[in-house]
Amino acid sequence: MGLEGPDDTAARVVTVELNGSNLPVAQCGVTCRSAGASLEGGEIVRVSVQGPGGGVAGFRVPDPSSPPADDALGRMSAAMEAVDSFRLEEQLDSGRAGVRSQYLFRAPDAMDIRNRSPDGTGSDIVFLGDTRYLRQLPGGSWEAQTGGVPTLPVYIWESFQPFVGSRIIGRERIDGTPTSIVSFFGGDEQLPVWFKQWIDARGLVLRAEMRAPGHFMDQRYHDYGAPVDIRAPDIGG
């Protein structure tokens, strides 16, 4: 569905290519298109949506015999729950606008977040215990508020359990470290979410992708267990 809503989406022309050849596309609903094909794995699929804000998405079909990733996700959950500090870089895009964020986490209750948009706006947020410090940019001053802070660490995919259809779909080195690439589905028909993670031998996530309607997130995790200095900012400064 386009960001403009279902009425606009109903008029969109969608084409589907399989290994460079067009497939017949049927409209199965206002915001639904379907195309049938026999797949063995390894094929290149390109889906094109015409109109403002449209574009082309391409992907390689995974091997349907890819092994289940339930054990890998179990090790990942245990490993990520046990870490006491890490850094995270995040790129979030809605399809119209994006924001880059940097996070510092230190268990059990300290977090530093820096959000920046291309237009120069953004925010800085520091959580320390039950106090939250907030500064809006550009030009804002730090303000303190009391309230709860999530018990850390916390991860976006935890909100979309149970995980469905998990598979190990490949291997890749991230900064020289071997990883298994795991994909799975979360959410439901009202909010469908697709995840992909690059998990190392320790069970730690080095990269993660989240795809949902109007929500395209890429994350890079690093510096697990490294010292993290999170301090209260100068109020009013």
Image (spheres, rainbow, N blue to C red):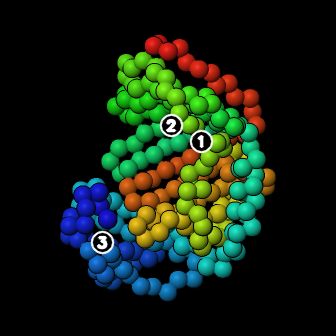
* Mark 1 surroundings within 10 Å by alpha-carbon count, few (fewer than 14), some (14 through 19), many (20 or more): some
Element at badge 3? loop
Q: Are marks 1 and 3 in contact (CB under 8 Å)?
A: no
Residue with the mark numbered 2: 101
C-alpha distance separating marks 3 and 2? 32 Å
Q: Quadrant of residue 37?
A: bottom left
What mark, if any, has residue 14 been given in the picture?
none
Of 14 and 143, nearer the camera is 143
Residue under the image location 35 percent in, 44 percent down: 97
Dot label at residue 31: 3
Q: Label 3 is placed on what type of residue? A: Thr
Q: In this picture, is 68 found above or below 76?
A: below
Instruction: Please give the name of the residue rendered at 29% of the width and 57% of the height, measured from the top-left corner.
Output: 3
- Check the picture and name the quadrant holding the N terminus: bottom left
**Numbered circles on residues, count:** 3
- Decide which of 53, 137 is in the foreground and name it: 137
Relative horizontal placement of residue 98, taking residue 217 as reference (left or right) = left
Q: Is residue 118 above or below residue 162?
A: above
> Disc 1 residue type?
Pro
Q: Residue at x 46, y 19 (%)?
A: 142
* Left or right, residue 19 beside residue 127: left
- Residue to which mark 1 is pinned: 150
In x, y percent, where is residue 162?
A: 60, 67
Disc 2 secondary structure class? strand
Q: For the residues carrying marks 2 and 1, which lies nearer the camera in this image?
A: 1
Q: Earlier in the sequence, mark 3 or mark 2?
A: 3
